[in-house]
Image (spheres, rainbow, N blue to C red):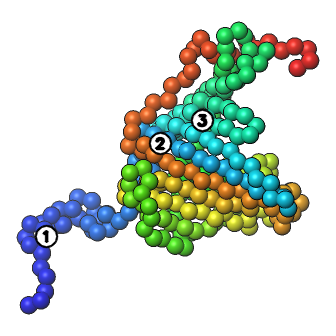
Amino acid sequence: MGRWTLGPALVLTASIFVSITGVPAEAAARPDPVAALKRKLNGHGGVRETAVFRSVLGPKKVRLTGRAKTVFEFGGGGIVASDLRFSSSLGDSRSIAFLYRVYNWEPEHPDYLPAGKSWIVSKKKNDLFISCGQIRLSDPAVLRHVLATTTAKHPAGVYDGTRTTLYEGSTTIGALYKLDPSVWVDNVNKPTGQHASYRKLPVKWRLWLGSDQLVRRCQTRYDEPDSPWSVEDRHVVITDERYSGWHDPIDVKPPPAELVATRDELVFSDDD
């Protein structure tokens, strides 16, 4: 006595699950954030992102802050459209991007825009992705790497209506660059050649994953070099992003055609 046994129905259910999937039931149920992301990117929904960017510059600790709200639409294994609204002390901007065209909002209606137009459209191929600081979260390979560097994990708060688990860790610019060649340092230089020393720069990260294994919040801290000649003098770049609406239908629309000008319609003076 004192031994637990499975009833016939439970044994049969487990056996059927193994024969259909080829893996034990307990292994198939193991949380997999990468698989959850892939399922979403192959769907027809999207996600909403609210972000705060902070930089602390120089010995006087000058602080700069920017805020963004972005809507991403998924399809075919990736992101097919985005609608970004950004604001900072330098002003506001908005950009609506699709795979082969992008619309930029010109809030001050500059003289080079035709009367009645407030958007400029450019036809070009775009690389659309979700990033949290230097981490491309919408790339399954990058997400897999980041989670593999986890050093701590514990229950956390509720975001987007779901209880989350907080994962924390640290990676490097070099490791991220191997997976994502779009990683640049100080927005100018790749971590190669004379800037190869940038590869050792750490990127600290925190991810809050919901019960569905989708990211609900991300924070990164990255000490970026102040100059291309030294990795010792740095300024701090902190990103804090929250994600919601993973399960909502999302359909990004272009601006009204009557408000959009092509580049051929722009009029520049000789002084421009």
Query: Which mark is in front, 1 or 3?
Result: 3
**Which is nearer the N-term, disc 1 or disc 3?**
1
Provide the secondary structure element on which disc 3 rests.
Answer: strand
Separation of disc 2 and disc 1 at Cα?
Answer: 40 Å
Report if residue 123 is visible in the image: no
Amino acid on which the number 3 mark rests in the picture: Leu
Residue 11, numbered label: 1
Q: Which residue is label 2 attached to?
A: 47
Provide the secondary structure element on which disc 1 rests.
Answer: helix
Is 87 or 258 nearer to us in this picture? 87
Quick one: which residue is furthest to the top in this view? Answer: 115
**Which is nearer the N-term, disc 2 or disc 1?**
1
User: Residue at coordinates 39% horizontally, 59% vertically from top-left?
Assistant: 163
Q: Position of residue 99 (x, y in %)?
A: 57, 32
Is 62 or 132 nearer to us in this picture? 62
User: Residue at coordinates 56% horizontally, 33% vertically from top-left?
Assistant: 83
Provide the secondary structure element on which disc 2 rests.
Answer: strand
